[in-house]
Every structure is written in structure tokens, then in C-alpha cells.
Amino acid sequence: MSSVTIPRTKPSGPVVPRFTFPQVALAVGAVLLALVWLAPLLWAVDTSLKPEPETTRTPITWLPEAPTFAAYQSVVDQGSILRWFLNSTIVACLVTVLTLGVSTLAAYGFSRTTFPGRRVLFGLLIAGILVPPQVLIVPLFQEMSSLRLVDTYWGIVLPQVVAPVMVFVLKKFFDGVSRDYEDAARVDGATRLRIVWSVMVPMSRPVLGAVAIFTFIGAWNNFLWPFIVTTDPSMMTIPVGLANVQGSYGLRYAQIMASAVLGGLPLLIVFALFQRQVVRGVGDAGIKG
């Protein structure tokens, strides 16, 4: 007696995905957090596009009745914002490049070499994370003043190059890299520096990219140290210059918001261009650390 095979029929119509309650709750929570994060930015853009009298009108208008870029034009014409942009770009780029170089070499040394006192030295380095930067302001300023670096790019840059967190992140990543790659390079006659440049750096690109972006953002937003070490308006960075704009413009909210939007615009562009590298770098550092 032969068996009868019943053909399977595919369900008609589109397949509706089913979400569990925790997934829906997480999605709603993420949307709410995104709105909370975006609200100040949207408010700043909205205010910067209003004519100055409309910014203080009661009741408040949520959208500009006649959007205008007059506040942006006024900021560019009256202030030194272009000079501050140039200063912030130079400072952020120098801090990023030097931090990557110093942190990579230090992390490789702690990860791959052995020398007396290595654990103690690494412990002191990590302890530096716990020291608030405000505590070091006075001795750092005295040091920069004795070196005649006040109101110079190097005076702003050099104290920011010391980044124990970045050394720690890179060391944890290097610890997860197999030593077989180095042994193969060493057999071919590569030196330590050659191994770092040709083996470790290419394998660490995602982490280095994340470190570079976080360092760039931190240097761009740093206010306290550039405020302390600069007195010449032509040497101010964007955050310090914006504080002066707020003081000189008084209650001109549209110009203040326009300055804030212009100051934060480069960071949004940088993060939009390299967000994949940031996510991948943070993930790799967390998994292999």
C-alpha cells in the first residue's frame, strides 16, 4: 500500500513579524530617549532661524513664521568665528594624531614587552583616570607658562595628549591579538616599530578609528583648558569663543543659537561619516577586551 504525500502550501499574504512586549518596550524607550536628546538641538536650530524679536515673543512660537539666516550672517560678519573654527580644527587634529601615536606605542609596550615595574607603572597610569582634570589645572598652567606656551597651539594641545583611557582600551585590544602574527613578522626581520606599524595598526583599525573619533570630539568640545591657557581672542577655540559671543551679544538669542549650531556642526558631520567605524571599534574593543 503506497503512502500519499500531502503537498505543503505556503501561507497566502505577507508575513507579519511578531514582536514581543520587551522588544516593543525597548523600541519605545529608544525613541523617547532619541527625542529627549534631539530636543535641545532642534530648539537651537529653530531659534537660530527666527528673527531676533520673535525669539522673545510671548506666547512662544514653536516654528519660525519667516525663517531667515540673518543670525548666521550676523555671527559670521561680526565675530571671529571663522578664526575659532580654524583654531579648533588645528587643535583637534593635532590632539588626535598625537594621542593615537602616543597611546598606540604605550599600549603596545604594556601589552607586549616586559620590564621591571611594568605592572606598577600601568597601575599608576590607570589611577590617572581617577584624578579629576580640574586638580591639574594650576600645575599645568604653571608648566605651560614656564615653557612660554601660553596663547600657543602647543600650549593647548600638549596637556590633552595624555589619555590613560585610550591606552587602556588599546592595550586590552592588543592583548587579544595572537602573538603568531608578530612571530611571523619577527622571523622576516621586522623590528618592534615595524611590527607596530605593519601588523598591529592594520589589525586595530576599527579600534583606532573609534579612539580617533572620540579624541577628536573631546578635543573639539574641551572648554576648561583652552579657556585657562588662552587670553588672546585670536587663539580661542570654538567653545571659548562661544562664551565670549554670549557675553558680547547679551540677550540676542538667535545669534547665540546660530553660533552654537555652527560650533556643533562639524561634530555631527564627523560622526555621520564615521559612525560605522565607531560602532565597530567599540564592539571589537568590548568583545576582545
Image: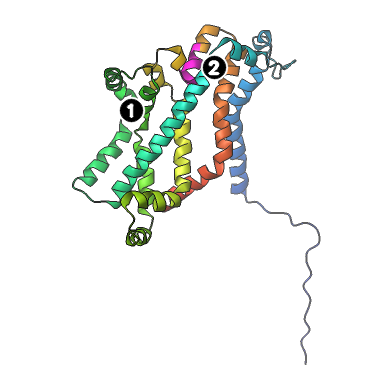
Q: Is residue 240 magenta?
A: yes
Q: Which residue is mark 2?
A: 81
Above or below for 268 versus 81:
below
- How far apart in space, not on screen, are marks 2 and 1 (Cα)? 30 Å
Q: State which mark lies toward you, 2 or 1.
A: 2
Q: Majority secondary structure of the magenta segment?
A: helix
Query: How many neighbours does mark 2 have within 10 angstroms: few (below 14), some (14-19), or many (20 or more)?
Result: many
Residue 289 makes an appearance in the image:
no
Place of residue 226 in the rendered image (x, y in percent of width and height, measured from the top left) = 40, 20
In which image quadrant can residue 68 be found? top right
Tell me the residue at 28%/38% (across/down): 125
At mark 2, the secondary structure is helix
Image quarter of the N terminus: bottom right
The kind of residue on which mark 2 rests is: Ile
**Range drawn in magenta:** 236-244
Place of residue 46 in the rendered image (x, y in percent of width and height, measured from the top left) = 66, 20
Place of residue 229 in the rendered image (x, y in percent of width and height, measured from the top left) = 37, 18
Q: Which residue is mark 1?
A: 132
